[in-house]
Every structure is written in structure tokens, then in C-alpha cells.
């Protein structure tokens, strides 16, 4: 078997997991290099002594371009009468109570939203043909405006792409990089299709340069890129479907978490991935959750992706006071430069500083590579505490409590607000900070059991290494569900043949998703294909929205066919059991925080340990809260259980 490497680039750390047939399992955590993450990747591989390998990479390259607005000068070409489609959106107010609502974020200025006279009707029939001379005039104007990338989104082009193809041919001949909506997002709803196509045009060239540079630097590596669906693809496929890589890193973590859950015989889990910049949460009820619509930096887009919700609360989230003097935690993050105050680089007060001040973190991270300065944390917390008129440790406890409240709200959003009872699920905590907050989050949602992987801070890199190859095809229908079934079967057979030609060697498996709604309804729901579609749709609609209309006709909006090839499985890294000789340390817990001595273990103990206690590993820290106990499980991970009240009081 080849050397397999998983790499995840986060906002604060870059994580490596290596499985080498000769040297065994290796792992590394190092600060992310800015502005070019590939520098850190190459340095990490050199430190690990890896040259020839199969490398799976979870990347934020496309995400950062969109968030930081660092893309090329981009234009939109659309149908006459729809030049303002990006500004109008769906007519929804982004902030319902804002007296002066901010303008809808767009990547294209109004003067670069251009129109053509060609027009199709709702069945794809030509109402006004496209004139090649008009295309050439548009191309000349765009070149004169120093435009680099162009998104072409014509009305109903997903039904008949001839006009877009002609525009693309002429614009490409003028030296412009072109994205065509019928290739990027061949679905109804012109706003979502236009926004997705513009986003692809905006990030694709930067992603292409980054992956090309990385591929050339990794001369002996077989490079794969993690997509938002939790699968991998070749670099050229990643660029072609650039919007499919916007949630690359979090999807890899969810993929790793779900595989671990299956090994443990669990079918219902909620995941919380706490990194340096943000917290990602997801809910799995028998399978990985997928969705099609999402947004990044206020920019909506559509692609097949795992259903992950993100909140700006991580270890590096900055604590500050707003104009009213109220405590805020996040969404701004200190990142790795300058990082939290305890990094010794003049950073601000963060969640990491608060945890360190309370004794819930050790004074070194990443296996000793990063020393933490508790006195520096106390100094910046004291500055904040003076403004809050609170003791320093109460300020630290308030910061942690607010961050955990924000994380718990995200977990409520994906469970209670969707009709799921979180008490019926196991919480899986990972990321560098997930296990530091897990018991507090579980208590807020009434959950009784927590599972922590053997290497929680490396699970995203591990998930990247284990992720399968996947590809999808989607088709819009907008017809009655009963009438569409024979046509769907014919389309699916053709789509299978096309996807087979793309697939790498290995055993192919297939899944199909159906997007269905009540006739006349604006919103829809996705269901797995198979028998009893109508019955399952009514049941899901009842759980999600609280009502169903059994006698109303159903409409098939679209179908999605997904092909998957599992890659050779690498052995998952495990931890050795903790020694039976823990040390003692001072810590503070509760509100207001109370001092006490806690036991500190290096690794996960084989015997039950009752909290408060702290478990330390190379890539993460576990805080066992009061009223909880923890024990190592067979695969090297950790299980935590809530104690009954009488047992908790007995302790």
C-alpha cells in the first residue's frame, strides 16, 4: 500500500495524518502559514520525511478568496431585464430589525452586470436568437473594462444551453475566463444560479493557481482535493466545480466522524468540531446529511454538500465589549498570527486565554510545539475585567460560557428546530477544542453520552485521508411526481454511463436523492430514492414543519444521482492508554468559578475517571466536567457519560 497522507489547513493550525506501511502511523500539528498555506504543507511533509505519497487535502483556498474578497475583477452577463438579479436577490431582508439594512453583498459591481437581447421561454424555446456580433461587442467592452472573469447566466439556459455556449466561445476567444451557468448549476431559480456561477467565476482562478502550485511542488505525490460533500476529486475537477470546495475542511471532519460512529455501531450522532476560528456542527440520523443550498460570506450558492452549520466561536475567537458595554465572543478571530495573547505575540483576549486562565488547558499545545503563557492571558483578561467590573476569573468564565452558549445554539438549530430530540443522540466532539467544551454543551441539550476520537484535533485530516471519490449529476424536472418516474429511470441510466467514465478504478456504489414539494409550494425537501416516496415525503414534512397535506399533489423539482468509489482504507491512529499516575493541578469551574484540585492524565485512562479532570493528548485537551465520567474505549477513543444525580453528589 502507498504512503497515505491527510492534510487539513485550518485558520490556526495545519494538521497532518500519515499512514506509512514501513514506519507506521505519524501525525503532526503545526501553525498555518499565511498568506500561502502550501508553504506550511511542504514544510510539514519535509518534517515528517514524506516524499512519495497519496495526499488528500482539505483546503480553505476557495473559501478565503470569497470571504476576503481577493478574487479577480468579475462581470456578469445575463438576459435583458435581469441585470439587477444579484442586488435584488429574493427580496428578503437579511436583518429584519435593522433600521438601515446593509446592501446585499455581491461580487460584481452594477456597472459590470451586462445584458444581451437573446431570450428563451420557460420550456427552453427560442424567443429571440443570439447574435454573434452582439457577443463580440460584449467581449470588447469587458476587455476594455479590464475584466478577468465572466459569469454567464441566461434565463432558462439549463433547458437549452446553445446561447450560453456561443457566448462562452466568443468571450473565451477574447482571453476571458468564463463560467457558464448551465454547467455550474443547471437548475431553476435564476438568482441562485447566477449567484453560484458568479462565485465559481470569482474563486476558480485562485483555486487553480493554488492547486497547480501545490501539485508542481509535490512532484512525487498523487494529489486529491476534499470537496464539500465529504468526498475527494482530482485537482482539475476541483477547479471545474470550484464552489464544491468552499466547505472542504469541515466536510472531511464530518466524514471521519461518521466512519468512527459506524465502527462504534452508532447511527444517530451530533458532531461539534471546534477549531481556532469557528465551530462546525452537524446531525447524522442513519446517514451523512446532505443539502444543496448554502452560503459563504453572505453569498448564496448551490452544490451537493454535507449539511454543516457554522458559528463564529472557536479557540481564537476574540472577546470584546460592544458599544453598549455587553460582552461579545467572536466572530472575529486572532488566527495563528498574532493568535491568542497566550501565544506571546501580542494577541487579544480569546476563548483559549480564558480556558488557560481557568486551568482547563495545559501550558503547552500541539505536543509541546506551542508554549502557552498564562500570565499573558491574565493580563489581557484583566484589562477586559476592569471594563466589565468583574474579577479576572469571573471574566474568563463569562467568556467561556458565552462561547459555549453560541455553540449550543448552533446544535439546537440542527436538532430541536428541525424536529429532532438531541437526548436521543450521542455527541461526538472533535477539533482542537471540541472536547474542552463537550460536557457543557451536552448538559445544555440534555445529552447523556459523548464520544471523543483517539485524535480529536486531527480528525479532519484523518477524514480527508479516508474520504471516498464521489461525483454527482443533477437534473431539473418541475413536473408531477407520478408522471416523472419513467423519465427519471431513463435519465438515471444515461447519467450512470457518464459517471462510470469519470470514476477511478474500484467498486462503484450508487445513491439517488429526490427533491420534492407540494404543488405550488416555494420550498422543497430532499429524500433518498426508493419505495414509498410520497409517504416518506409527507412524514418528513410533518416532522420538519409541523403539518402535512396528504391529499395535495406532489411535484418533483429535481433528482441527483451520486456515484461513489471507496478508496483503500488506511489504519486509523489510536492512542496508548494513559498512565495510572495522574498529576494534580489547580483549576476553576462553575459560575462564579470555584477553585479546586483536579487530576491531569496524559492520554485516555482505561479506568473510569470522574470529573472535574483534564486529559491531555498531542492534538487536543479533554475537560471532564463535574457530574461526568470518562473511560477509554477499544478503538483508542474516549467515551464520557453523565452521572446520575445521586452518584454525582456521592462523589
Image (tube, grey):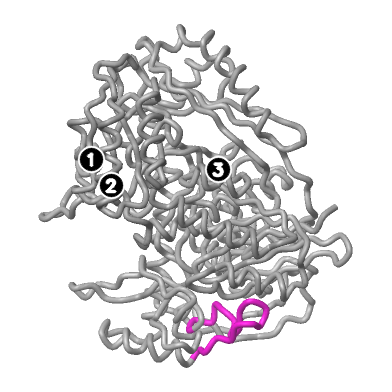
| Rendered location of residue 553, percent (x, y) | 37, 11
| Rendered location of residue 55, percent (x, y) | 70, 57
Q: Earlier in the sequence, mark 3 or mark 2?
A: 2
Which residue is label 3 attached to?
A: 229
**Which secondary structure lies at badge 2?**
helix
Which residues fall within the magenta stretch?
357-374
The correct choice, above or below, for 433 with respect to 151 in the image is below
Of 265 and 630, nearer the camera is: 265
Q: Residue at x 55, y 63 (%)?
A: 434
**Which secondary structure lies at badge 1?**
strand
Crowd rating for badge 2 (residues with CA inside 10 Å; few <14, some 14–19, many 20+)? many
Asked whether the beta carbons under mark 2 and mark 1 sit within 8 Å of each other, the answer is yes
* 3 or 2: mark nearer the eye: 2
User: In the rendered image, is residue 569 in sight?
Assistant: yes
Distance from disc 3 to disc 2, alpha carbons, whole Å, reads 34 Å
Q: Quadrant of residue 604?
A: bottom right
* 2 or 1: mark nearer the eye: 2
In reply to whether residue 373 is colored magenta, the answer given is: yes
| Rendered location of residue 77, percent (x, y) | 28, 38
The correct choice, above or below, for 177 with respect to 215 in the image is above
| Rendered location of residue 463, percent (x, y) | 65, 53
Give the number of the disc on residue 114.
Answer: 1
Q: Residue at x 68, y 63 (%)?
A: 218
Give the side of residue 548 with respect to residue 374, left or right.
left
Which residue is label 2 attached to?
A: 142
Q: Quadrant of residue 5?
A: bottom right
The correct choice, above or below, for 182 with respect to 420 in the image is above
Of 97 and 388, nearer the camera is: 97
Amino acid at each position: 500500500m502507498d504512503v497515505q497522507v491527510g492534510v487539513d489547513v485550518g485558520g490556526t493550525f495545519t494538521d497532518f495524518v500519515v499512514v506509512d506501511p514501513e514506519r507506521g502511523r505519524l501525525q503532526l500539528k503545526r501553525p498555518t502559514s499565511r498568506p500561502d498555506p502550501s508553504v506550511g504543507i511542504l514544510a510539514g511533509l519535509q518534517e515528517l520525511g514524506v516524499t512519495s505519497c497519496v495526499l488528500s487535502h482539505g483546503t480553505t483556498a476557495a473559501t478565503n478568496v470569497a470571504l476576503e474578497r481577493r478574487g479577480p475583477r468579475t462581470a456578469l452577463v445575463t438576459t435583458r431585464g435581469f441585470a439587477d438579479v444579484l442586488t435584488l436577490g429574493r427580496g428578503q431582508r437579511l436583518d429584519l430589525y435593522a433600521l438601515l439594512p446593509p446592501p446585499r453583498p455581491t461580487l460584481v459591481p452594477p456597472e459590470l452586470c451586462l445584458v444581451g437581447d437573446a431570450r428563451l421561454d420557460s420550456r427552453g424555446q427560442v424567443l429571440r436568437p443570439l447574435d454573434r456580433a452582439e457577443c463580440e461587442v460584449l467581449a470588447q467592452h469587458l476587455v476594455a473594462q479590464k475584466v478577468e472573469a465572466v459569469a454567464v447566466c441566461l434565463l432558462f439556459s439549463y433547458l437549452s444551453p446553445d446561447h450560453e455556449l456561443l457566448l462562452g466561445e466568443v468571450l473565451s476567444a477574447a482571453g476571458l475566463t468564463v463560467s457558464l451557468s448551465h454547467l455550474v448549476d443547471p437548475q431553476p431559480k435564476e438568482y441562485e444560479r447566477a449567484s453560484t456561477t458568479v462565485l465559481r467565476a470569482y474563486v476558480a482562478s485562485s483555486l487553480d493557481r493554488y492547486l497547480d502550485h501545490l501539485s508542481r511542488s509535490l512532484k512525487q505525490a498523487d494529489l486529491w482535493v476534499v470537496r464539500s460533500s465529504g468526498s475527494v476529486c482530482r485537482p482539475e475537477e476541483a477547479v471545474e466545480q470550484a464552489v464544491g470546495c468552499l466547505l472542504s475542511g469541515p466536510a472531511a471532519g464530518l466524514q471521519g466522524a461518521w466512519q468512527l460512529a459506524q465502527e462504534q455501531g452508532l447511527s444517530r450522532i451530533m458532531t461539534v468540531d471546534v477549531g481556532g476560528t469557528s465551530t462546525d456542527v452537524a446531525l447524522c440520523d442513519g446517514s451523512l446529511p446532505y443539502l444543496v443550498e448554502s452560503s459563504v460570506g453572505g453569498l448564496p450558492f448551490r452544490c451537493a454538500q454535507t449539511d454543516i452549520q457554522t458559528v463564529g466561536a472557536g479557540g481564537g475567537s476574540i472577546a470584546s465589549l460592544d458599544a453598549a458595554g455587553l460582552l461579545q465572543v467572536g466572530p472575529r478571530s486572532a488566527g495563528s498570527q498574532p493568535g491568542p495573547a497566550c501565544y506571546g505575540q501580542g494577541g487579544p483576549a480569546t476563548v483559549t486565554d480564558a480556558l488557560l486562565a481557568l486551568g482547563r488547558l495545559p501550558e503547552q499545545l500541539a505536543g509541546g510545539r506551542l508554549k502557552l503563557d498564562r500570565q499573558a492571558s491574565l493580563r489581557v483578561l484583566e484589562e477586559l475585567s476592569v471594563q466589565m467590573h468583574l474579577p479576572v476569573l469571573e471574566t474568563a468564565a463569562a467568556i467561556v460560557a458565552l462561547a459555549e452558549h453560541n455553540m449550543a445554539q448552533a446544535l439546537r438549530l440542527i436538532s430541536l428546530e428541525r424536529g429532532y430530540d438531541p437526548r436521543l443522540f450521542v455527541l461526538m466532539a472533535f477539533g482542537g477544542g471540541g472536547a474542552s467544551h463537550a460536557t457543557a454543551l451536552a448538559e445544555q441539550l440534555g445529552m447523556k453520552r459523548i464520544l471523543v476520537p483517539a485524535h480529536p484535533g486531527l480528525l479532519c485530516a484523518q477524514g480527508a485521508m479516508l474520504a471516498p471519490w464521489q461525483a454527482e449529476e443533477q437534473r431539473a424536472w418541475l413536473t408531477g411526481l407520478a408522471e416523472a418516474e419513467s423519465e427519471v429511470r431513463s435519465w438515471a441510466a444515461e447519467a450512470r454511463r457518464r459517471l462510470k467514465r469519470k470514476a477511478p478504478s474500484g467498486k462503484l456504489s450508487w445513491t439517488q436523492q429526490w427533491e420534492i414539494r407540494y404543488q405550488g409550494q416555494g420550498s422543497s425537501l430532499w429524500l433518498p430514492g426508493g419505495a414509498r416516496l410520497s409517504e416518506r415525503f409527507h412524514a418528513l414534512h410533518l416532522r420538519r414543519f409541523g403539518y402535512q397535506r396528504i391529499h395535495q399533489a406532489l411535484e418533483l423539482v429535481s433528482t441527483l444521482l451520486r456515484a461513489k468509489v471507496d478508496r483503500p482504507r488506511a489504519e486509523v491512529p489510536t492512542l496508548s492508554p494513559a498512565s495510572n499516575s495522574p498529576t494534580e493541578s489547580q483549576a476553576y469551574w462553575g459560575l462564579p468559578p470555584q477553585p479546586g484540585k483536579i487530576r491531569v492524565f496524559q492520554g485516555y485512562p482505561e479506568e473510569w475517571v470522574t470529573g472535574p479532570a483534564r486529559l491531555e493528548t498531542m492534538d487536543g485537551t479533554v475537560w471532564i466536567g463535574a457530574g461526568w465520567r470518562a473511560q477509554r474505549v477499544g478503538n483508542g477513543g474516549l467515551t464520557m457519560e453523565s452521572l446520575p444525580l445521586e452518584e454525582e453528589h456521592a462523589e
